[in-house]
Amino acid sequence: AQSVTQLGSHVSVSEGALVLLRCNYSSSVPPYLFWYVQYPNQGLQLLLKYTTGATLVKGINGFEAEFKKSETSFHLTKPSAHMSDAAEYFCAVRAYNNNDMRFGAGTRLTVKP
Amino acid sequence: GAVVSQHPSRVICKSGTSVKIECRSLDFQATTMFWYRQFPKKSLMLMATSNEGSKATYEQGVEKDKFLINHASLTLSTLTVTSAHPEDSSFYICSADGTSGGPYEQYFGPGTRLTVT
């Protein structure tokens, strides 16, 4: 079975500052890893995903994440936060051989002017 | 890209009535769709996995007789909340498995806000 832990339910940064949202996973088989963003009263939008290949994955809106197998981590970063980045972010994991996706508890990102 | 729609986006119903929520994959066929429930300021909880032409697989603790799922075609899955009660008020999100984005890519609908009075 797969599971995800997101460290920090709430992260606050200043506009222009580095964004770092932490995600650690547990999986008994090679995982597929995802980051989604959710704006209020909306569904989830895929930011980026890791399946195979390059461990540094670039996504939309300037976000990127690095798959570190030794640390079982998939932290999300963005060099410079923008006000529009304020939202809820979810890390998710699923096994390579099934469609069972599990979500972390989410991290609410606040961007201060 | 792959688009998933949900209808309605918001619904208010009285306690004891039933409500149907539709989830459609607009530009691709989805053999598998998923239904999630999201409580305020909480993560998504998988309720059930819906496979076209077969019975849905429910997660532990989810009442199959209360949350009826039908996946009658490759582009449509429905969730019916039967005899709704205020505690069923929640944000319901569906997703569909697609192949255009790669293996095991899930595409999410915009969600349905259910309020039971």
Image: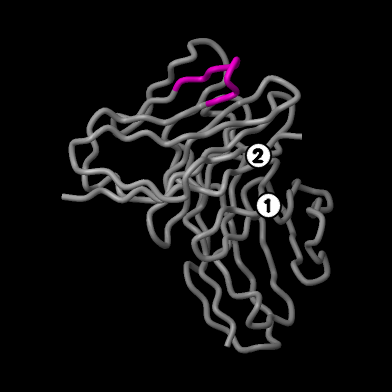
How crowded is the residue under tag 1: few (<14 C-alpha within 10 Å), some, or many (20+)? many
Residue at image location 46% in from the left, 20% down from the top: A66
Q: Position of residue A42 (x, y in %)?
A: 43, 57
Q: Amino acid at mark 1?
A: Leu
Is B85 situated above or below B73?
below
Q: Which residue is mark 2?
A: A101
How crowded is the residue under tag 2: few (<14 C-alpha within 10 Å), some, or many (20+)? many
Question: Numbered disc 1: what chain?
Answer: B
Q: Amino acid at mark 2?
A: Met
Residue at image location 22% in from the left, 32% down from the top: A80
Q: Position of residue B48 (x, y in %)?
A: 73, 53
Whether residue A67 appears in magenta in the rendering, the answer is yes
Q: In the image shown, does B77 or A80 lie closer to the viewer?
A: A80
- Alpha carbon of mark 2 to alpha carbon of mark 1: how far? 8 Å
Q: Which residues are magenta?
A: A66-73
- The answer to the question of whether label 2 and label 1 lie on touching residues, with beta carbons closer than 8 A, is yes
Residue at image location 51% in from the left, 69% down from the top: B113
Q: Position of residue B44 (x, y in %)?
A: 59, 53
SS label for mark 1: strand
Q: In the image shown, does A102 or A24 lie closer to the viewer?
A: A24
Q: In the image shown, does B36 or B94 lie closer to the viewer?
A: B36
Question: Numbered disc 2: what chain?
Answer: A
Q: Choose top left, top right, bottom left or bottom right for residue A92.
A: top right
Is B39 on the left-hand or right-hand side of A19? right
Is A101 situated above or below B69?
above
Is B44 situated above or below A85?
below
Q: Which residue is mark 1?
A: B46
